[in-house]
Image (cartoon, grey):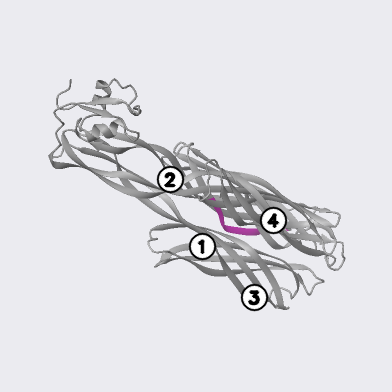
Amino acid sequence: MSQIDAIKESIGFEQLIRESNSNSVLKEEYLIPDTHPDVQEILTVEARPMIVSKELVGDKIVLEGKVEYTVLYLAREEGLVANSVNYTEKFTSNIDLNQGEHKVVCEVECKVEHIEAAIMNERKISIQGIFGIDWEIYKSSEFEFVKDIEGTDDIEILKKTETINRISGSEEIELSGKSTIRVGMDKPQINKILKCSLLLHKKEIKILEDKIYLSCYCKLNILYKGDDSRELISIEDDVYLSKEEELKGVNSEMMYSVSYDIVNNDLMLEEDDLGEVRIINNEFLVKANVKVFSKENIDVIKDAYSPKFLIELRKDEYELGAIQGTNSSEIMVKDNIPLKENNLKPDQIISSNASVIITDKQVEIDKVIVDGILKVDILYKTSDQDKYVASVKSEIPFTSIVDIFGARDGMKAIIRNNLENIDTTIEANTIAVKATVILSAKICYEMKKQFISDVIEQDGEAPEKKASVTIYVVGEEDTLWDLAKKYNTTVASLLKINNIEDPEYIEVGKKIIIPGRAIF
C-alpha cells in the first residue's frame, strides 16, 4: 500500500483566446404612423443597440440583438412643428469559432458607428446604421495540481512560487432606478415627449471582504414639445443607483471588470393637481456584469524524490491566461465645430448627444495607446422664425494613454469606454464641445506552465548509494537539489557535511563532499 498522500488543489481561470470586432449593417424602410404628421425634414436620429442573447450553436456564437430608433423631424404640416417617431428592429450576428474553441465565454459590447435617416416620401423614411460589435472569447478552464505530499518523511520536496490569476467570483447584479420630474409653471405643460436619453456615469465599484458594492448615476435628458406651442423644452434629472451584493471569497486586493447595460426604461406622464400634464415618471433597470480576479502567489511542487523508494511524478503543461493589470484614464475631448454657410445661426443649444468609438489600440511598455472618435449630434434653436430648430453633427478624433505597469508589446488590450458628460456652448460662429470620457483598459497575456498532477509510488528499490565518499567539483549549472537527487542523498546532508549556509548558492569550482553509505 502506498505511503504517499498527494494533497491536491484545483484552480479555475479564464483565458482570453481571441478578441476582435465585427460590424452589423441595418437598412430598413419605415412608414410614418397614421397618428403622426407628414415628414418635411429629419433633424436627428438616435439609435440604442443592445445584445439580447448569446447562444453557442455548432461552430459559432449566435448573437441576437435589437435596435431602438428615435427619429426627430420637422412636420410638413402645423407650421414645421417638431415631432418624433420610434421604431424597433431586431438583428442577428455570428461569431465563427475555430477548431477546439468549445465551452467558451463570450463578452460583447455593441456601439453605434454610423446612423442616418433619409426621406423617401412624406410618409416613409429609410434608416441605415452600422453597429460595431466588440467581442472577446474566453476559455473557462480548471486544472488540479499537487500542492504538497504527506504520509511519509522519506520524500524530499522542492517547492517554487507561481503567480496565477484565479476567478474569485462573478455576478450579474440588477440596479433599479426611479425618477419623478415635475415641470415648473415657468415652462409650458407637456404635449408630447419627443425623446428620452439615459446616460450612466460616475460608475464606481468597491470590492470588500466577501461582498461588492456598486454605484452609478443615471442622467435622464428628456425633450418634450410644449402644449399649444412649437417650443422644444429640455429637462434633466440625475438619479443615484447603488447596491451591495454578497460574493464569497473576494477582497479589496483583487482586480475586477464590470460592464453596465440599461435593459429597460418605462416612461409615464401624469397630471398635476391643476389637471395639467407636468409630471414625468421614469422607471429603468440597469444590469451590471461583474467579474473579480485574484492575483495569487501559490506554492507548488517543482520536483520531488525519495532516497529510500521510487516515485513517479506526473507532469502536465497548461497554457494559462493571465491579467497583467487594469487601470482607467479620464480624458477631456474638446473641439469647436465650425458652422457652414448653409447652417442656420444657433441661438440656443437644446440638447447634445454623443458616442465614443475606439478605432485603434497599441500596447507598449507600461502603457496602452488608444485612438478614438467622439461622434457628436447637437440640436439647437435658431434665430430663423420659420425654421426655428436645426441640428449639426461632427466627429472629433482623440488619442490617449492608459498606464499599466508591466504591459509589453505582444500582450492583448481590452478597452472599454464611457461618456461621463458632454457640454456644448455657442462661441461666435462655432459650437464648442467639451466631453469627459473614461477609458478602462485590461491587459492580458498567455503563459505556459508545468504542474505536477500526481505523485505515484513505484515498485522496486531505490538505487543504492556508493560505498565511498564522492568529491565533486561544482559546475556552473549545478544546484544542491540536483546533486542530492543525482547521488540519492538529501540537501540537508550536503549542507551539514560541507558546512554550507545558503542552500540556494554554491560556489562554482568548489569541491564538495557527497556521502556514500557510510558518512565520515
Residue at numbered disc 2: 169
The three-letter amino acid code for the residue at tag 2 is Gly
**Residue range highlighted in magenta:** 259-275
Q: Percent from the top left, x then y, of residue 354?
A: 68, 57
Position above or below: 515 against 378: above
Q: Main secondary structure of the magenta part?
A: strand
| Among the two numbered marks 1 and 4 on one chain, the one whose residue lies closer to the N terminus | 1
Task: Say above or below: 320 vs 84.
Answer: above
Q: Position of residue 439 (x, y in %)?
A: 61, 48
Picture quadrant of residue 474 = top left
Which residue type does callout 3 highlight?
A: Tyr
Q: For the residues carrying marks 1 and 4, which lies nearer the camera in this image? A: 4
The quadrant of the picture occupied by the N terminus is top left
The tag earlier along the polypeptide, 2 or 3, is: 3
Residue found 73% across the figure and 74% down from its top: 37
Q: Disc 1 or 3, which lies upstream in sequence?
A: 3
Residue 371 placement (x, y as % from top left): 64, 54
Residue under label 4:
397
Mark whose residue sits in front, 2 or 1: 2
Mark 3 vs mark 4: give the one in front.
Answer: 4
Q: Between tags 4 and 2, which lies in front?
A: 4
Residue position for label 1: 52
Crowd around label 4: few <14 · some 14–19 · many ≥20 (10 Å): some
SS at badge 1: strand
Q: Quadrant of residue 56?
A: bottom left
Q: Is residue 267 magenta?
A: yes
The structure residue drawn at horizontal position 29% and vertical position 30%, both measured from the top left corner, is 480
Using a 10 Å C-alpha cutoff, classify the residue at mark 2 as few (fewer than 14 neighbours), some (14 to 19) or many (20 or more). Answer: some
Q: Is residue 228 visible?
A: no
